Amino acid sequence: MTKADIVDVIAAATGLTKVETEAVVDGFISTVIDAMKAGKNIEIRGFGSFKVKKRKGRMARNPRTGEQVKVEEHFVPIFKVSKDLKHVVDENLKKTAGTTAA
């Protein structure tokens, strides 16, 4: 599902125009990005958490040349799915898989 698909679904469900819905979706994405750039975590109960994780510096190997390369300490964005969402997806797909199995 793409961002455009998400906009279409939300617009149909809420009665907002696609332009209004796209502004809301873009605003949400911008807010998450800005918070993460500031080192903040975002938690949406029942959905998941966006977090910034610090990775230690280490030595790595360039797969093409085999040369040892130093990877500096850096930060990476992480998304962790909530237990509720995991459960809902698992249960729904189990039901779907059970009905399509022949």
Image (spheres, grey):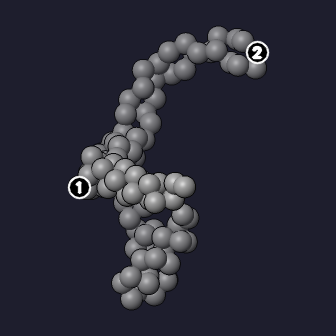
Mark 1 residue element:
loop
Q: Position of residue 6 (x, y in %)?
A: 48, 70
Quadrant housing the N terminus: bottom right
Residue farthest toward the front in the current orientation of the protein: 102
Observer-nearest of 3 and 95: 95
- Up the image or down, 5 lies above or below 102; here it is below
Observer-nearest of 11 and 77: 11
Residue 20 visible here: no
Of tags 1 and 2, the one toward the viewer is: 1
- The structure residue drawn at horizontal position 55% and vertical position 13%, both measured from the top left corner, is 59
Mark 2 residue element:
loop
Q: Position of residue 48 (x, y in %)?
A: 31, 50
Within the image, what quadrant is residue 76 found in? top left
- The structure residue drawn at horizontal position 38% and vertical position 29%, both measured from the top left corner, is 54
- Give the amino acid at mark 1: Arg
- Give the amino acid at mark 2: Thr
In 3D space, how far apart are the residues under numbered discs 1 and 2 (Cα atoms)? 45 Å
- The structure residue drawn at horizontal position 55% and vertical position 72%, both measured from the top left corner, is 4
Quadrant housing the C terminus: bottom right
Q: How many marks?
A: 2
Within the image, what quadrant is residue 62 found in? top right
- Up the image or down, 63 lies above or below 14; here it is above
- The structure residue drawn at horizontal position 36% and vertical position 84%, both measured from the top left corner, is 14
Q: What residue sits right under mark 2 in the picture?
A: 65
Q: What residue sits right under mark 1 in the picture?
A: 45
- Up the image or down, 81 lies above or below 64; here it is below
- Taking the image as shown, residue 2 lies to the left or right of residue 30, namely right
Residue farthest toward the right in the current orientation of the protein: 65
- Taking the image as shown, residue 44 lies to the left or right of residue 13, namely left
Q: Label 1 crowding class (10 Å Cα cut-off): few <14, some 14-19, many 20+?
A: few
Residue 73: image tag:
none
Q: Position of residue 84 (x, y in %)?
A: 26, 52
